[in-house]
Image: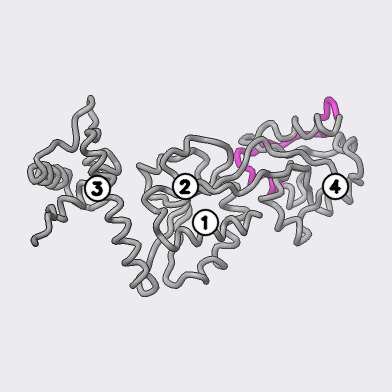
Amino acid sequence: MKRLIPPLRAVQYFERAAERESFTDAANELNISKGSVSQQVRLLESYLGVQLFRKSGRRIVLTDTGRRYHSAVRNAFNILESETERIVGSKMRTTLRVTALPAIASIRLVPKLAEFQKLIPNLDIEVSAEAEIIDFNRSDAQVGIRYGGSNFDGLEVTHLGVDVLRPVCSPSYAKALSIQTPEDLNRCRLLHDTYWHDDWTRWLFAASIENCAGCDSQFYTHYSMAIEAARSGAGVAIGHKMLDIDLINNGELVSPFDITIDANQAYYAIVSERAMHLDYVCKFRDWLKDLLN
């Protein structure tokens, strides 16, 4: 019996346009013209005898039928992609696309990526360091590493842990200023990360230190900059244990006090819906969980 299979090119173009809800974005991704995408979608609509998209202002959105059909098409493509990867994945170059907070990317992830790459032949890794929460429906990213809660609908979420915060500095700085008690911070330069701007306030409150301004302060827009300043002996920063544990273990940083506080929120690994079925993505998520715990 002949299979009822629609034109596959039209289905492919529809899947990309539906994923982005944009003919323009789909055309850019497929490296073709917007007209070609629109033409193929109309061909598919004609074949099916239904409307898959409707106009909403200047945008296109899926109809209810279009949304159901997109879900079925995506599942079918996922199965096809997964089986293809299983058969020829080790013979083909593959790209893993990761988005992460700049602090996580530069301090913890990038130095260890070569270890993960050894596990999967022919794997390229693309890392984007972004503070903003991205829309996975409009991004090529397959995995996101994020701090704090957000809307995780349609995403696979793995809890990576809640962090511990405490002051850190270089061994030479701690020795030069004889840092032994929290009160000694009044003689120190405090290094502030403006992204996690309340870390010092919360820790000083927990240590019962009032009106501690230090001898002076430095402010950085990225945590990695504050930690690099601390590592180089510029002052004392609030360290996030899950991020700077390697620097502590190799002696580049020390934590002068036993007083710690929990971070306000947790770290998560987020996998986009269209990448959940990929073996190398799942392996990276599992490796990441081991790395940060």
Tag in front: 3 or 4: 3
Q: Give the quarter of the figure containing the N terminus.
A: bottom left
**Mark 2 and 4 residues: CB-CB less than 8 Å, in contact?**
no
The numbered mark, 2 or 4, whose residue comes first in the sequence reads 2
| Magenta span | 209-229
Q: Residue at x 63, y 37 (%)?
A: 265
Query: What number is the disc on residue 210?
Result: none
Rendered image: mark on residue 256: 4
Instruction: Identify whether 254 is placed above or below 279.
Output: above
Q: Was residue 85 drawn as part of the magenta stretch in this picture?
A: no
Q: Residue furthest front?
A: 1
Residue 285, labelled with which disc? Answer: 1
Residue 28 in view: no
**In the image, what residue type sits under mark 2?**
Glu
Element marked by disc 4: loop
**Does 249 appear above or below 268?**
below
Q: Quadrant of the C terminus?
A: bottom right
CB within 8 Å, label 1 to label 2: yes
Residue furthest out toward the bottom: 91
> Which mark is first along the chain, 2 or 3?
3
Residue density around tag 3, few if under 14, some if 14–19, many if 20 or more, within 10 Å? many
In the rendered image of this protein, does residue 184 appear above or below residue 241?
A: above
State the separation of the CA atoms marked 3 and 2.
20 Å
- What is the crowding at mark 1: few (fewer than 14 residues within 10 Å), some, or many (at least 20)? many
From the top left corner, tell me how far across and down residue 244 is, in percent: 69, 52
Q: Amino acid at mark 4?
A: Pro
In this view of the protein, can residue 148 be seen by the observer? Answer: yes
Q: Which residue is mark 2?
A: 156
Precedes in sequence: disc 1 or disc 2 = 2
**How busy is the neighbourhood of tag 4: few (under 14 within 10 Å), some, or many (20 plus)?**
many
Name the residue type under label 1. Arg
Residue 219 drawn in magenta:
yes
